[in-house]
Structures are given as structure tokens and as C-alpha cells.
Amino acid sequence: MKRIVTVQDISCFGKCSLTVALPLISAMGVECAVIPTAVLSTHTGGFTGYTFRDLTDDIPAIENHWKSCNLKFDALYTGYLGSARQIDLMCHFFDTFGSENTLRFVDPAMADNGKMYAGFDDAFAAEMAKLCRKADIIVPNLTEATKMLHEEYVPTGYDEDYIQGLLRRLHRELGCPMPVLTGVIYGDKHGAVAYDSKKDAFISYFAPHLPYSLHGTGDTFSSVLVGALTRGLDMANALRVAVEFTHACMEVTIPDLEHHPYGVKFEECIPLLVSLCGEN
């Protein structure tokens, strides 16, 4: 069985980060180990008064114990990291557990809609760029990409040449062999575009655009993409699985307005995910 370790926070209620990554990767038939970076009573979108416990100090001990157990991983997957110190720890973690056969996958979750998340600034984006330099695949959205490239954020009206230019710069300036831009919208299509620097080729997949913003869709996309790649799918098929599944999760959630703050109803779509994986 293939094995992924994912490193990100866990919200006791609300579907994002680890509460999305663990069940989805497991449903894909891939073993999922976790390192929680923090524990929150709820996710931070749409809730107030939530509790927060930082687990940064536990990460080195977990790493050392795993090293003593001689654990091996097929993929190292980082999501939301709450501080520059956690980024430094992940750089070390990649060096410790990475090999030429290990997929290093970074979701630089730190910004959206042109703004950094609360508590983050441009200095944090520069630190995140250091981790992205160690990755084989990165999956920033447009805001995160422009922050790391010190580029002005363009929310709408861009074209294919603009997206391809950003991807080439992510490869050239961060050194990532295969950057993937998420949340790309061309007219009535919404999806992701990857750049394979070895072949100098672009790979994309799109679904119909749904004019809603729902919590956890980025975590859903990233978790399914890394799971698909770890199962051995090429980028074209992995993008197809990740985009189609994320789109389906949004479709079943949108009619239930009261559920919007809690995240997408991915549980209802797990049979589809299993089916999509079985097709490859």
C-alpha cells in the first residue's frame, strides 16, 4: 500500500485541512499518516471564539520517533502551516524523509482573493517560497502565486498567456519542476493548470464554473490530487480526478445554504471518488 504523510492543522468541527485530507486519501486506497500542527475547536471561517492549541513543539519529537522507526513515505504533503518556524521544520522534514522516489507536495495555503490570511504577511510568503523550492509539485491559487512572485494580483480578465507566464515564473524563480495553479477561471470554466517543465508543456482540466465560494474546496482538491499522483496517475488524469471530485462536492453542497460555512459535503461524493480512482 502506498503511504502519504500530511502535515497541517486539524479543526474538531468544520471540514478543512486534516478532516478533509485523512478521509479522502484513505478512501483512495492510500495509507495516510498525519502530523497535526495545531488543534482548533472549529475552523476559522464563519466561526468566532474558537479555541487554538499550537503543536509546533511536538513536531521535532514526532519526526525523531519516526526516524527511529525507519518509516518511509511515498509522498510528503504539507497544507496550512501557521508560522515561519513550522515552515523551517518542514524544510528539515523534507530533507529527513525525502528521497529520489518521494513526492514532495506543497499546498502553500496562506492567501486568497488577493489577501493574506489573518496573521500572515509578505514576509511569511517569502518563507513559504523557501519550502516550495524543495517541492516537486506546488498547488498555489492565484493569490498565493502572485504573493510569492511579488506580482500584482489580477482577479479577473486574465488569459491563457498570463496563466502560462505565471507558471513558467513559478518554475524558474522557485525551482519547482511542476507548479499547478488552482482556481483558474476562463469564461464559464473553472479548474487548474499545471506546467511540466521537463516537457515544456501545459496540462489542464476544467469543469463548469460555479459562482460560489465554499470552505475546504482547496484542501479537497489538493488531497485528491496528491492521492491520485501517489497511486501512479499521470498529471493529466490526476487533475481530472481532482477537479471532477471537487466540482461534485460543490454541487451537492450548494443547495444546502445552512451547510455552506461548514465546508463541502465530500462524504456524499466518496463513492464517486472510489469510482474515479477505479477507472485508472
Image (cartoon, rainbow, N blue to C red):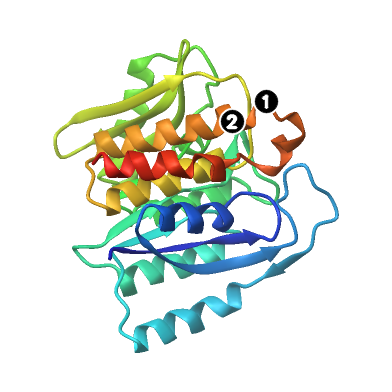
Q: Which residue is the site of mark 2?
A: 252
Answer few, some or many: residues within 10 Å of disc 1's Cα (few below 14, many 20 plus, some between 14 and 19). few
Residue 83 visible to an observer of this rendering: no
Q: What is the x, y in percent for residue 98?
A: 28, 67
Quarter of the view holding residue 42 = bottom right
Q: Nearer the viewer, residue 77 or 233?
A: 233
Q: Amino acid at mark 2?
A: Val
Q: Residue at x 35, y 59 (%)?
A: 30
| Residue placed furthest toward the left | 199
Mark 2 touches mark 1? (CB < 8 Å): yes
Q: Residue at x 63, y 49 (%)?
A: 15
Residue 137 tag number = none
Q: What is the x, y in percent for residue 273?
A: 41, 42
Q: Which residue is the site of mark 1?
A: 255
Q: Residue at x 38, y 19 (%)?
A: 162
Q: Position of 198 compared to 226: left or right?
A: left
Q: What is the x, y in percent for residue 208?
A: 46, 17
- Secondary structure under tag 1 reads loop
